[in-house]
Amino acid sequence: MITGSNACSAKPRYSRYRYRLAALVIAGLPVFAVIHFLAYWLRFEGGLWNDEFRKSTITLGIVLGAKTTAFLSFRIYQSWNRYVSLHDLVKLAQAATASSVLLAVIDYLFLTAHSVPRSVFLMDWGMTILVVGSLRCAGRLLHEHVQFGRWSSDDAPVFIVGPNDAGEALLRAIRRSPNLHYNVVGFIAEDDDCPKGAISGAPVVGGLSQICHLASQHRVSEVLITAGELSGQKVRELISTVRRGGVSVKVLPSYEQLLHGKVDLRPRTVSIEDLLHREPVQLNPRELREWLDDRVLLVTGSAGSIGSEICRQLLQFSPKKLVLVDQSETGQFFLERELRALAPDQDIEVCIGDVCDSLRMHQLFFQYKPEIVFHAAAYKHVPLMESNPEEAVKNITLASRLLADLSDRHGVQSFVMISTDKAVNPTSVMGTCKRLAELYVQALAVDSGCRFVTVRFGNVLDSAGSVVPVFREQIACGGPVTVTHRDMVRYFMTIPEASQLVLQAGAMGKGGEIFVLDMGEPVPIVNLAEDMIRLSGLRVGEDIEIEFTGTRPGEKLFEELHGDGEEHTSTSHPKIMIAASAPRGLGQIRSSIDRLTQISTSDKSEIAALLAEIVPEFQREQPTIPLRCIAA
């Protein structure tokens, strides 16, 4: 029910709608009348004698009533001429056909004394579609002519990549939005062999390999791409190609993003997620649903970047209960508010607790009896863990052992631990502690009823404390952007991808596996910095400088995804592999961790020495001397 001011505002709108509808009906009557008489005139070859003229006059009222009824029923009057499309013309043909059939039935049943020739019905039908359709198209053409008249010579000439449906829709959107200040001068095809032609008046000027020459020829300053039109690798190649000519690349959100309300309608600058060197990972939703539906799920580190995204992904399914565990009170507060807004009916329990607190973890497992555990809580900053090895041991290794033991003891069905590529041939305390946690979980899986699996992946784009937000802040402050070493490379994935991999691996796991994502080629960090500077509309070495500061304690130049002695085996998922190796004995691993527990408050060098003894592949990397080189 509409009340108060809403009712007042609704009444004028409804009145305007009725007035407009009445005006269109009245305006259509003389058009129908002229068509009707013209059909008679053509039928009798330009001569309307008294009898035929009388017949046409007698039937005119019936014709007007039948056509008006049909046009109202098919909502022809309700559609706007400025947006008329092929769909509207099809509806017009349907309305004209319905009115002609109705007239023929009325003529056959009730007008035997004034029967109308069948050819009059046929010509009336055809001319109705032709005349009314032409009038409606003329209205759209007039509107678009007025719209085009608003364009300014200051509007930026642009190319659209993709002469297809998405590109044509983008072209129409730009033409209807003068405030975007774009002038589309042509389309760029992905394939150079694409036939030349035009789409809505905009020519297909050439292929991607010719884009620099074409941009210079047409004085184009921007290239627009619809999201998903090109792979991440081709987007990166395109940016690398055109940036030398001062041309920027922007991506327009896809229809799916628009429908889900995830984005602004205005084209955006290319984000780092667009530059992955591979196609995004695809999931098996049926397998995940069978695994997750109607289960009690517990997520540690729920307020972190990965943990919170895992929680969001889990809401796509139907868990019986979702238990969030994190020691960050503020992070849990905001996450709970977000998740309850996303799924108001979902049973969510928010728990504040430290995964190192044995009593608190015992209490949570006893109280909620989780069936599936996702262990995402862990410290991740390599240099800080080098300075605080005792905390790394406690938070990463001991906490993982505690949660794994609780899962085994409380009958948990599946335990999924998140690991890192830094655990492979580790050069840092953090990576070594992660490797030790991997070994423990793998050993525990041998004789346990719980399915213990580990998921190992590289750097996560735009996660809290990662390089992307650091670079973004440095660029916003005017630089310099600091990179530790010119040769440093990393594997990258997005936060949603990392979280989806965790779910998929958990569903696939039988117990004891270490799952690894095929993340394509590693990305040089200096290239990432240069891309972010250029995508911000700035010039490397002129507007923003890149400064090399030297590697920090524990950092590696090259990360790896599988270690010495590990064999990669394929899985049912083309992008997920297993890093297979013989598990160590559980008793041996427990004894080693017990020794770590006993010296966890000892000297840092003693802790590092024992870690190297337990994990022989641990070789400390010496930091490089800080440099002050500037990238041009």
Image (tube, helix red, strand yellow):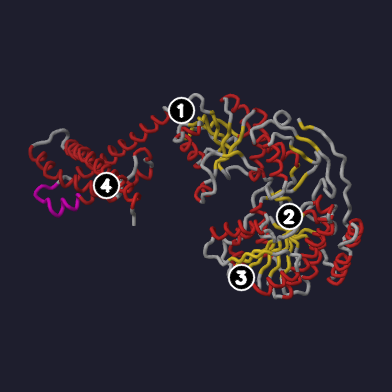
Q: CA distance from mark 1 to mark 3?
A: 58 Å
Residue named by callout 3 = 295
Location of the C terminus by quadrant is: top right
Q: Main secondary structure of the magenta part?
A: helix
As helix, strand or loop, the secondary structure at mark 4 comes to helix
For the residue pair 612 and 148, the one nearer the viewer reads as: 612
Q: Is residue 500 visible?
A: no
Q: Nearer the viewer, mark 4 or mark 3?
A: 3
As helix, strand or loop, the secondary structure at mark 1 comes to loop
Q: Assess whether mark 1 and mark 2 are in contact (beta carbons under 8 angstroms).
A: no
Magenta part of the chain:
103-115
Residue named by callout 1 = 151
As helix, strand or loop, the secondary structure at mark 2 comes to strand
Residue named by callout 2 = 457
Residue at x-position 72% and y-position 35%: 479
Name the amino acid type tagged 3: Arg
Residue 529: x and y in percent read 72, 39
Location of the N terminus by quadrant is: bottom left
For the residue pair 508 and 266, the one nearer the viewer reads as: 266
